[in-house]
Image (tube, rainbow, N blue to C red):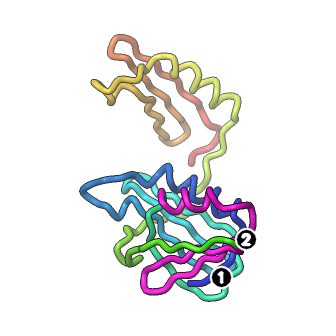
Amino acid sequence: MKLTILKEKLNEGLKLNEKIAKKTLALPILENCLLETEKNFLKISSTNLETGVNYWTLAKIEKEGKICVPVKILTQIISLLPLEKINLFEENFVLTIENENYKTQINGVSPEEFPIIPQPESIKPLILDTELFCEALNSVSKIPMPSSARPEISGILISFKENVVEMVATDSFRLANKKIFLSENF
């Protein structure tokens, strides 16, 4: 893999991916992001096995390829560089980061170890009136309380059935329920 990219675009994608990738003792590969070239784009992917992120940004691709590197380390290095073009190239699972005055390397791992992020099947989009959605969310959001002792009641359940979007929340004493009726099924 060999490419040139603007620092601000790379940094934006890495910061988004860093929020998903977390340190885990059971699966250290989840601390990594997958850098992959696709035509004229650099794709940066991360997952925690519950949520996945794919971020595409334009780049000047000289050689196709992919590598897995620790996202936190890469983000810290990129954020220290001046605002300009950055050259990235990979050889033998080592990512080299280079610009006019700076050069460093990060050891990576095989991209084959990175978990596959499932792609959603094509589905019909749900179009809601923003005002109605915010009003419904606001009416149930006052009920749940953040609690590490009972995390199951610290959120809002949003369910989609035929032509109804329903929001439900509880704090074990009170129950809030709000329905939004849609004009068509989805």
Residue in view at x 45 percent, y 29 percent = 156
- Residue that badge 1 annotates: 39
Please state the total of marks drawn on the protein image: 2
Question: Crowding at label 1, few (<14), some or many (≥20) Cα neighbours within 10 Å?
Answer: few
Which amino acid does the dot numbered 1 rest on? Lys
Q: Position of residue 3 (x, y in %)?
A: 64, 80
96 inside magenta stretch:
yes
Q: Secondary structure beneath disc 1?
A: loop
- Residue that badge 2 annotates: 85
Q: Is residue 86 left or right of residue 160?
A: right
Q: Is residue 132 left or right of residue 89?
A: right
- Nearer to the camera, 117 or 93: 93
- Nearer to the camera, 37 or 28: 28
Residue in view at x 52 percent, y 63 percent = 74
Q: Which residues are magenta?
A: 72-100
Mark pair 2, 1: CA separation:
19 Å
Q: Position of residue 40 (x, y in %)?
A: 69, 79
Which amino acid does the dot numbered 2 rest on? Lys
Q: Position of residue 178 (x, y in %)?
A: 52, 23
- Nearer to the camera, 23 or 121: 23
- Residue furthest to the left: 26
Q: Is residue 107 left or right of residue 97?
A: left
Q: Quadrant of residue 84?
A: bottom right
